[in-house]
Structure formats: structure tokens, C-alpha cells
Amino acid sequence: MLVMIQTAAPIHVCSQDKYHRIDRVVTGHAFAIHNELGRFLDERLYQRELTARCRNDGLAVHPEMEIAVTHRDFTKRYLVDLLDDWGAFLDPHLYREALTHFPGGAEKVIQPIDVTTANGMIGKHEMHLLSPTSAFALTAVTRRPSAMAEHQRRFLRHTSLAAIAWVNFNRHDIELRTITG
């Protein structure tokens, strides 16, 4: 499967230490701007000021850089604020949208399934289905992914699903697991 990701500027991966150093600078500016200007300005004005302060600190900033992600007839465009030294990542929602699009769209893929307990059906929960007995889930869990897997197992026990194909984006790792009850 070939997925094209096009950006107006290169995206770099940096160490966690460097990421946290830059994060402290950017977050500090964001809070200072909010405290100084209040909360009722147009977002573009906050963005301009944050861009200026980051550039004054020597950070290379690309406000609202477009990232286009394409696979076959599916294209999703994002506008992201990118710091050259900090990088950016694609939101798991993008992948969920693509995985929903290719098999026929939301009308076909997203379906309500019965959730039951010892007291009977308690309601319906929408899931992204791969088949009548399997679903998929995409997350970005970075702490204790095993806890997420256990919660998915608990959920499965209360549905007619046999499995969840789980994709977890954990920083630089992509984990693929089949969760069964």
C-alpha cells in the first residue's frame, strides 16, 4: 500500500530531550501570550505572535504549512504549525478516515453494535467494522498500552464481536495487535 505524504517543508524527527526543551519554550510563549492578550482574540492573532516569539528565539517556524496525504482516490489535507526542529505527526484520525473511506465509507463501515451485560442489552455503540464480527481501532496511546488492550478485551466480552484489529501509534513505533475476548 503506497501512501503519499507531501509537505511544503521537511519534517524532522528529534530526540525526546530536544522535543521537551523546545516544548517548554513554545508552551511558555503560548501561556505568556494568553496571559498578556486575554482569551478573546482571533486565533490568527495568537498564531502571529507565537510565530514571532518563536522566531525571536531562533526557532524556524512554518505557520499553517499544508500536509497532503494521498492514497488512490483518497486525499486529506491538513494545515499544521511546524517548527523545523520539533517536527509534526499525523493524527490517527487521518488513518481512521482513510480506513473508513476505502471499504465503502462511513455508511458501510461505522455500525452500531449491541452492548450487553448480565442484565441484557444496555445499548448500542458505534464501531468501525471490518466484517460483521471484527472491528478496527486506531489510537495514540503512549503510556501503558497494555491497559488499553485490556479495556478493549473487556469491551469485546460484552459484544458479538470476535476481534478488534488495533493499531496504536506510540511515538516512533506503530503497534499492530489483534485483540480477542
Image: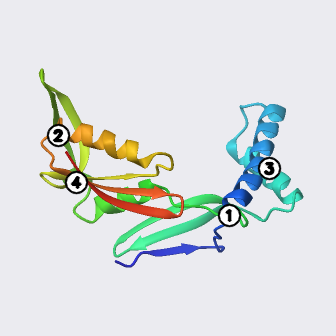
Give the vertical position of 163 relative to 39 (above or below): below
Badge 1: residue crowd in 10 Å (few <14, some 14–19, many ≥20): few
Write the residue at 53% across / 60% down.
78
Write the residue at 78% across / 55% down.
51
Write the residue at 69% across / 61% down.
86
Write the residue at 81% across / 34% down.
37
For mark 4, what is the residue?
A: 109
- Would you identify the image quadrant in which residue 28 lies? top right
For mark 3, what is the residue?
A: 25
Residue 142 rendering spot, x and y as whole percentages: 50, 50
Which amino acid is tagged 2?
A: Ile
- Determine contact: label 3, label 4, CB under 8 Å: no
Q: Residue furthest bottom?
A: 2
Which amino acid is tagged 3?
A: Val
- Which quadrant, please, contains the C terminus? top left
For mark 2, what is the residue?
A: 113
